[in-house]
Amino acid sequence: MNPPEKKSLDLYAMTWRLPVIVWQTIFFVGPLLFMVAMSFFVVKNYRMVEAFEFTNWEKMLGRGYFWDSYLLTLGLASLSTVVAMLIAFPAAYALAFKVSDSARRWAIFLLIIPFFTSYLVRTFSWYVILAESGVINAILGYVGLGPYTMLNTKFGTIVGYMTLTLPLVVILQTFALANIDTRLVEAAHNLGCKPFATVWRVVIPLAKTGLIIAALFCFILSFGDFVAPYYLGGSKPPTLPILIIDTTKSGQQWPRAAVVAIMMMVTLFAVAFAALTAAYHKRGRS
């Protein structure tokens, strides 16, 4: 009697999983396979022709400007992740341990509000703040400093990345820290552990999984963002998302743009796999 019962349970579970499987197949696996196939097509007379040639891969991966864009995108996304994690942690720590539950709920609600508006609109608002005649330079001018060029720089790009990722990172870090058993923190204090040592030796290890997930989301969003490096960073030199746009405009080279997109996805899959492995790795396991 057990095998039929197990089979019915499997069919029941499969029934609920089927919509997700179909959705992922149609809107993720299918387009991904088509993009991989398209990277082997060739463009003749501004039209794509089905083929199986490695010309696009050779021309993109053999060009220095691709690797310059790749390293730039990787470096900016990594820097954005480090900056966001460092800025968010004190705020998340305060929300998790220093305020009431009611205040924490209101703070999370306020952090969600920016997502109610367009990211493009929020990015454009930085023009008023970062321009040479903007708010920051006007304030610095009162003390005899500036004006400083902040638009069309890597600094502007990082500011745009923070606009996109920082609220989310604070929320994820807050959830990770709020789930820590406060008795363990109190025990560390009672045993004479100083505040910084408590954070480093107790809080961060206990919240490791949530913190790594927050960093992963920040990296993924920054790595794939087009708006910040284009409008605040000046797009010179281009990041990989901008390179995709430039490539499609150059003779309708969609197959070469597909090569860039595939390289981005491979990188993100590798980073995600490494991050999740580190997040769920248990000490003492071989």
Image (cartoon, rainbow, N blue to C red):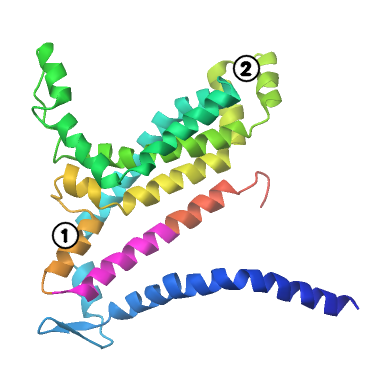
- Look at the picture and state if 261 lies above or below 101: below
Q: What residue is pinned by disc 2?
A: 193
Mark positioned earlier in the residue sequence (1 or 2)? 1
Q: Is residue 157 something that shows in the picture? A: no
Q: Is residue 47 something that shows in the picture? A: yes
User: In the picture, which quadrant includes the N terminus?
Assistant: bottom right
Residue at figure coordinates x 13%, y 68% from the top left: 249
Please state which of residues 54 and 34 is positioned toward the viewer in this rendering. 34
- Kindly report the distance in space between the C-alpha atoms of the residues bearing marks 1 and 2: 51 Å
Residue at figure coordinates x 56%, y 47% from the top left: 279
Please state which of residues 221 and 120 is positioned toward the viewer in this rendering. 120
Horizontally, residue 151 falls left or right of residue 118, namely left
Q: Position of residue 244 (x, y in %)?
A: 22, 63
- Report helix, strand or loop for mark 1: helix
Horizontally, residue 71 falls left or right of residue 150, namely right
Which quadrant of the figure has residue 127? top left
Query: Please, what is the three-letter code of the amino acid marked with disc 2?
Result: Cys
- Report helix, strand or loop for mark 2: loop
Horizontally, residue 168 falls left or right of residue 249, namely right
Query: Please, what is the three-letter code of the amino acid marked with disc 1?
Result: Tyr
Horizontally, residue 62 falls left or right of residue 87, namely left
- Look at the picture and state if 200 lies above or below 222: above
Residue at figure coordinates x 17%, y 69% from the top left: 248
Q: Range of the magenta residues?
A: 252-269
Q: What residue is pinned by disc 1?
A: 65
